[in-house]
Every structure is written in structure tokens, then in C-alpha cells.
Image (cartoon, coloured by chain):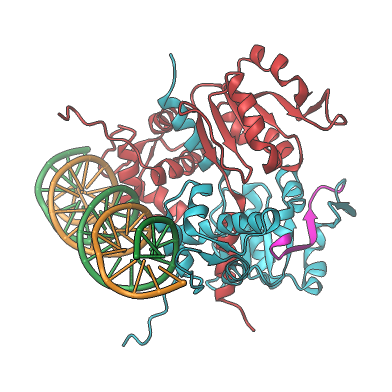
Chain colours: A red, B cyan, C green, D orange
Amino acid sequence: MSMQKKKLANAPSIRRFPSYLHVIQRHLGEKRRDYLSATVIARELDLEAIQVRKDLSITGIAGTPKRGYPSRELAAAIERFLGWDTVNRSVLVGAGNLGSALLGYRDFKEHGLDFVAAFDSDPRKTSAFVHGVPVFDIADLETALPSLNARVAVLTIPSECAQSVADRLVSCGIEALWNFTHAKLDLPGHVRVQKEDLSSGYAMLSVMMRGSRKT
Amino acid sequence: MSMQKKKLANAPSIRRFPSYLHVIQRHLGEKRRDYLSATVIARELDLEAIQVRKDLSITGIAGTPKRGYPSRELAAAIERFLGWDTVNRSVLVGAGNLGSALLGYRDFKEHGLDFVAAFDSDPRKTSAFVHGVPVFDIADLETALPSLNARVAVLTIPSECAQSVADRLVSCGIEALWNFTHAKLDLPGHVRVQKEDLSSGYAMLSVMMRGSRKT
DNA sequence: TAGATTGTTAATCGATTAACAATC
DNA sequence: TAGATTGTTAATCGATTAACAATC
């Protein structure tokens, strides 16, 4: 039954790729090295070389013993693997503290996340620009969104309204949601959702500190 | 050699605890349920009940068959487990987009992260307040920080200066760093570091979308 | 009581790490 | 050449899930 099983990447590997790309691009910029070994990448990220090699094998780029991987090709392959070589038109809903920060985050723009508009319920924020992105009234979502051709929506609104706003976004054609709220979203199966939780990182830090408490 | 091996929590479990706490507190607030079962918690978080039960066993709180876990006790136990029942005086370095957003993030304050000051190199931001937190010139770090009694520092500065600023923070007595930069920090062993990477979540979203591309 | 739920022990699954031949 | 590095296959490790007796 199984013909040519495609090696699918696992989540931990996918999450490491952006850091690989970052290291490679820094080396390309500063030191102009044409080749970069897994050993070097691993050292700069506090990982094991074997893990880096395993991950990089997913890209299909072959390394050369003694030299490593061709930097430029590898960077391009990672970008292609992540889908960061194509532009994703996107909107952000909730131009508050976190939302505004994300609108201005350069890394995202460089990797294809193109904010074409933001929406907010606060009339004071509406019809202004945040980091060059126009902010519309969320009441106008249904009239404004369809013509924007956006595929992605970033949710940085209060958790209580997350489900209803998500429903409206999906009915306007949004295919993927990056959810920074605490709400679990119930959506049609074709809609991709990535949930983000800043508290989980804070929990890690807290537990580490609890372990080294002086009292 | 092994006496009474203490059951240490693993990272995935620690990362799930904030969401458990959130569900419990919402139930306590809205519905005033004295007991909450793993089944219910799991459903609201898209997890398996068995996983929730396994995690909750770490807190030491015993559930009652047919009813579940005592909500109030459970919430208190999770807060204690995470160390969220004690206040951590902290500073933020780099009051830019992301930094300002974190200063205003209510969830952190509610869970013991108390920003007593921020530092920035931009003189226009200095000697003002962001979300009620005073912003000092980073040049004055060594004079201001020691008297603030802060244990934690949040790093939201450009990656290039992360190492040098981290060194200065540690020499002023900072014990834990929440690192939002791309820099790998080389620090004494007693300093706890939690690295955060928003790009990894974006990578997950991108790969999901790449899989469902229309073209 | 019957049935849902807990909590523990065992099985499974998946990711990391080790081992090692190939190669530049 | 010698030695570092790749890439593959196998072993290990750790987290999730299953099984099931206990219990309310």
C-alpha cells in the first residue's frame, strides 16, 4: 500500500529551521563563507551536530565531508522548505500593544509575512497607520477584507471575542490563523491554526527560578 | 545511590500548566464550579484527558472519581508549582515595539512578573514611563539596577548587543534572563536563561500553509 | 447500583542520540 | 595521507497513550 513514503518533517525540526537560517545568513553577511558545517551551526545554537545534520537532511541539500553545506543553497532550501520564499498577504486584528509590535517586526516581513491591513474596534486607532499599515474599523471587516486578498490573519484581540472574529475572518476567505489569544478556536477543517502562548515560556523561566531560589 | 527520586516535571508539561490554570480560573469566575474534571479541561484545550490527568498528578492534588479536581485547590497548586505565587522583581531592556508590549501584558503581572524599571539606549524614550514603568538610560544601568532588587531581566534589544548587555546585567546581580533576541548567550552556570523565538511559531504556520497551497 | 472518573502501571510512539562506513 | 565531516541505520531515551483496577 505504501509507495514512496514522503519523509515529513516533525514539529521540533520545523521550529529549529528559522534559527538555522539566521545563523547561515549571518555567516553569509559577515564572514562570506561559502560553506558552513553542521558542527559550526550546532555550536552557535547550543545544539548537537548530529541533530543539525538530521534536520538539514530534510532540505535535500547534500553536504560535503570536511567542508559542510553550501551556505547559499542551504539558505535558499530552508526558505523554500518553510514557504518563506513566497509572500503571504495577511491582516492583523487587534492593534493593541502586542498587535502593534508584531506589525513592526522586521523578521516577519523579510520572510514573506506581508501585513496589508489591520483592524481594531477602538475608533481612536481606526483610519490611522501603525508601522505603515492602515488600521480599519473592525465593523468594516466584511466590506474591506475580501478585496485585500489576504490569506493569513493574526489574532491579537481579547480572548472573549476571538471565536466570533475568527468566524467572520474565515467567512471572508482567510485560510490560516495565528492565534495569540487564550481561546481554543472551533473552525472548519481546512483552516490552519497556529496557537501561540507567551505564558508557556514564562512558565519555563519561573520553574527554573523556583529551582534556584535562595530562601 | 538513589534515595527518594523526586519526580521532576518535563518541559512539555510545564508549558501546558498555564493553559490549565487559565481554564480553571475562567470556570471559577464564570460558572463557579467547585470541581473540574480532566475530561472537561481536556476538551476545552483540545488535549487528551489522560494527558491532563498525568500532568495534574505533578501538582500532588488528588481528584475525586466522578467529580474531578477541586478547582480552587488545583489553581493554587499550579500557581505554587510554577512559582507564580511569589513576586519576581524584574527589569526590561529595550523598550521598543516588543518590549513595550511586554511591559503592558497583564497576564505577566498577574502571575508575579513585576517590572520595576525599563532601560533603553534611545534618549527620546528615557526618563518617561511606558505602561507605568519608568524608562532609564541604559548607560545608567550599573548605577540604577543594584538598588532595584530585581532578579529577572527581559531582553528585547537588537541581537548584536545582547551578549554585552547580558554580561552587564549579570554583573549587577540578575539571576534569570528571558531572551527574545537571536543571540545565544554565554553566561555563568548559575544564570537561568529562557530563550524565546517568535519565528518558530511563524515557521509552523508557514509549513502548514505550504501544505494547503492552491497553486 | 451503574457509570464516569481517577491514578497507576505498562505499551507505544516519536524524537534524539549513538555508531560507523563513506568520502573529501 | 590523516582527520574531520557527512549521511544512514540502529539504539536509546523520553513523552504520550492505552489498559485497567479502584472508587465515588
Q: Which residues are magenta?
A: B110-123
Which residue occupies 44% across, 67% down? B65
Q: Position of residue C10 (x, y in %)?
A: 21, 66
Determine the residue located farthest toward the top in the rendered image.
A147
Q: Position of residue A81 (x, y in %)?
A: 40, 30
Residue A137 in view here: no
In the image, A33: left or right of B69?
Answer: left
Q: Is residue B138 above or below residue A97?
A: below
The quarter of the rendered structure image containing the N terminus of chain B is: bottom left
Q: Position of residue A34 (x, y in %)?
A: 40, 35
Q: Residue B117: say if magenta.
A: yes
Q: Quadrant of residue B84?
A: bottom right
The front one of A114 and B146 is: A114
The front one of A147 and B27 is: B27
Which residue occupies 82% across, 69% down? B143
In the image, A129: left or right of A192?
Answer: right
Which residue occupies 66% across, 46% down? B158
Q: How many marks?
A: 0
In the image, A80: left or right of A120?
Answer: left
Q: Is residue B8 above or below residue A60?
A: below
Q: Position of residue B122 (x, y in %)?
A: 82, 47
Determine the residue located farthest toward the right in the rendered image.
B127
Residue B52 in view here: yes
